[in-house]
Image (spheres, helix red, strand yellow):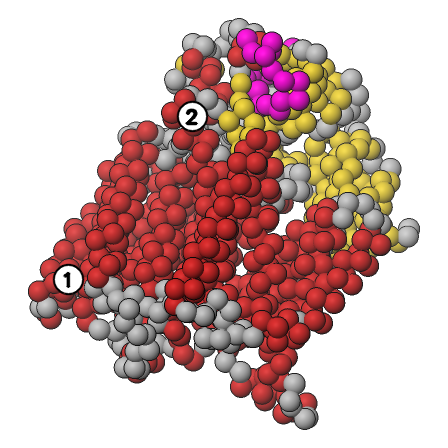
Amino acid sequence: MIVEIGHYALVLALALAIVQALVPLYGAIRGDGPLMAVAQPAAVVQFLLVALSFVALTHAHVVSDFSVVNVFENSHSLKPLIYKFSGVWGNHEGSMLLWVLILALFGATVALFSRGMPDDLRALVLAVQSWVSAAFLLFVLLTSNPFARLDPAPLEGRDLNPLLQDPGLAIHPPLLYIGYVGFSITFSFAAAALISGRIDAAWARYIRPWTLGAWIFLTLGIAMGSYWAYYTLGWGGFWFWDPVENASLMPWLAGTALLHSAAVMEKRDALKIWTIFLAILAFSLSLLGTFLVRSGVLTSVHSFASDPQRGVFILGILVFFIGGSLALFAFRATALKPGGIFAPVSREGALVFNNLLLTTSCATVFIGTLYPLALEAVTGEKISVGAPFFNLTFGPLFIPIILAMPFGQMLAWKRGDLLGAAQRLVLAVAIGVAGMIVLEALRGGPVMPAILAGLALYLMVGSFVEIYGRLRGARTIGNMVSRALGLPRSAWGTALAHAGVGITLFGLAATGWGVERIVTVKPGEPVAVGPYEVVVRELAPRDGSNFKELVAHTEIREGGRVIAEMDPSRRSFTTRTMVRTEAGIVTLGAGGQIYMNIADVRVDGAIDLRLYWKPYVALIWLGCLIMSLGGLLSLSDRRLRIGVAQRASVRPQAAPAE
Amino acid sequence: MTRKGRRLVLIASALAVIGVAAGLALFAFRDGVVFFVTPSELAEKTANLSPQARMRIGGLVQPGSVQKADERHVSFAITDNQTDVKVIYTGLLPDLFREGQGVVAEGQLINGVFRADSVLAKHDEKYMPREVADSLKQKGVWNDGSGPKDK
């Protein structure tokens, strides 16, 4: 019964979405207030209906109702409770339902928190948003119904793919989806601006919190996915330039560019058309990512099952929205009043430079990801474009971005002083170069890690030079603290986010100093790895709820003293007869990690081990956390708070007409 | 600087960045791209392969072909049930590596033996590298319901 209610709620949500897509749009074009006012309650109720449907599916999973195909195929009565919850989106149908849920959630949020916005803009945004949700609701109902029944109901389920039975599944997909789908709002704003033909600095102010929010979650989602791959795949890799990962990186790059170009638009009323284009691009790339992952054109852990019908449907959605919005863009962009052009050496000039490099690097990722698919479709030849391609193209484009980042913070709007900025960055450059030399002298080996680490140090220090400059005049410490607190939070946000990039880069650079050992040992036999010694004490079997495992109780020693312990294991899942290894990971000073994985246990009790010492590796993900924290600080800045936007919109327009 | 001059700077720098990116991409495509072949295709092509060419071969692990010289030196054969290629690999095999299952090896062909530097196995019992599944279908050794036919 509950399952049928969920299904019915989803059908109702679709009907409502169609109403919400058409009525406010018509109202906005006709200037009819009551028709536009339909949008807000419709968006809220649509969310409630999808939420009800999601709760119904969750209920079926939690009570292990195997009469539902989705539950039967992906659950097991003995599965731990947390995976019964997260297993809801650990399959194609459920994950699409989560997608729609977040889409509706964003629609409802706009409806509820947009008091300062002009009525017609709000109505148009919600209408466009509802076009997207109607399309995806239709997709879920027609091709991926999570509520399909099975008669007679089986007694036991097939269990969830063991690779997905991990706390990462509870966190990674929701974060990533909030990020992906968050760009739907900026897309809707862009389409609304194109339909209404009006766009100004206030528009840029409206989209900024949404862009920032989506960006924060996307950053966290990508970082979480990468850490999950790192600890679960068993050989310590964390980024594979796999198409599925690229699919999440591309919207991130476009979103980062959008964040920066929207700042220019807000402050200088310039780059309007470009910002609209980026808003369309960011969501188009999110849709492309959904297509790549969900359609079955790629096989990976992410594509739970492939069904050509689904692929064609998502492709249809993709073509409709990308094609439609770009056509709208082509027809209407000329109607928008263009902004001014500005000096190359200025804050806005630096942001344009940033945009240029980010979008170009995004384009290289795009080519590397889609070229193999296109080639195969056209000639049938199968190629794989791997890490060497991306390292060669993406790397050289990112280095100038990193060099320019502290400069961008330092340059003034309108007219910057490049030489002055360079003088103030002398300290950061000096620390970077010194770090490079010291690290190379200490570590030896190839120079590339040291160069990148020096670059990272330069960025970390350089990110705070601007803030330091603002505090330098303070006489007492108390004065300095009050000045620091008085700075706009977005200034701190920028500094933190930029420093976060530096921290991540340092972690990436340090992978070059890692130590890898592949050995076969008997319990009690010590293995040296990096500055430490690792000893497997004993090998013991242990029973889990739906698996059995062999645990290697292991000690890590430094200079003969035990400093840490870990319990890596090999798990055998009974239902799917599949083995998964649980790596043992211990973080020691400065984010370095010992990583151990049991590759095989022989009959005579000898163990094949993969052992790694990865100095500073945790900084990769710590940096991403700090980037998100910077985003969060910016988001809490006074000028982005709700309600301020209206006052700001009456600000005189600065741009001269061409 | 005049308006025209500023616009020129913008356009010139855009072209420069895009030009550099295109150059890098073309350069990287020469070395960074790896072709995927089946054992049969490899046998056909052997004659006109440059000795340094990296490639991926995919197929099934020939049952009974896996030999471990010592803990880290493994040899096995990849087959598409028509032709097979001997592969030698130094390192630990993935958890899911099993005889009769789908596998992709990446490396170079040297004197008729494929020296792999990475070996990928399938993720679960349903999953098989798509290239492998496709080529098995082409060779008619695939049942839609159950995956590879038992022979």
Q: Which mark is residue A24?
A: 1
Chain bearing tag 2 is A
Q: Residue at x 60, y 42 (%)?
A: A391
A437 is within the stretch colored magenta:
no
- Residue found 91% across the figure and 51% down from its top: A560
Task: Identify the residue shown where x is 83% and y is 48%.
Answer: A444
Upstream in sequence: badge 2 or badge 1: 1
Is disc 1 placed on a helix, strand or loop? helix
Q: In front here: A630 or A99?
A: A630
Residue found at x 35% / y 48%: A284
Circle 2 residue: A376
Q: Between marks 2 and 1, how big is the CA–CA gap? A: 43 Å
Q: Mark 1 and mark 2 in contact (Cβ < 8 Å)?
A: no
The disc labelled 1 sits on which kind of residue?
Pro
Residue B52 in magenta stretch: yes
- Check disc 2 and report its element: helix, strand or loop: helix
Q: Residues within 10 Å of mark 1 (few under 14, many from 20)?
A: many
Left or right: where B32 falls relative to A642? right
The answer to whether residue A122 of the structure is visible from this angle is no
Q: Residue A14: x percent and y percent?
A: 20, 49
The chain letter for the residue carrying disc 1 is A
Start-end of magenta stretch: B44-64
Query: Looking at the rendering, in which quadrant would you find the N terminus of chain B?
Result: bottom left
Residue B130 visible to an observer of this rendering: yes
Three-letter amino acid code at the position of disc 2: Glu
Residue A195, compared with residue A201, is above or below; it is: above
The furthest residue to the right = A560
| Residue A457 percent location from the top left of the image | 69, 63
The image quadrant of residue A520 is top right
Of residue A1 and residue A280, the one placed in the foreground of this image is A280
**On the same chain: label 2 and label 1?**
yes
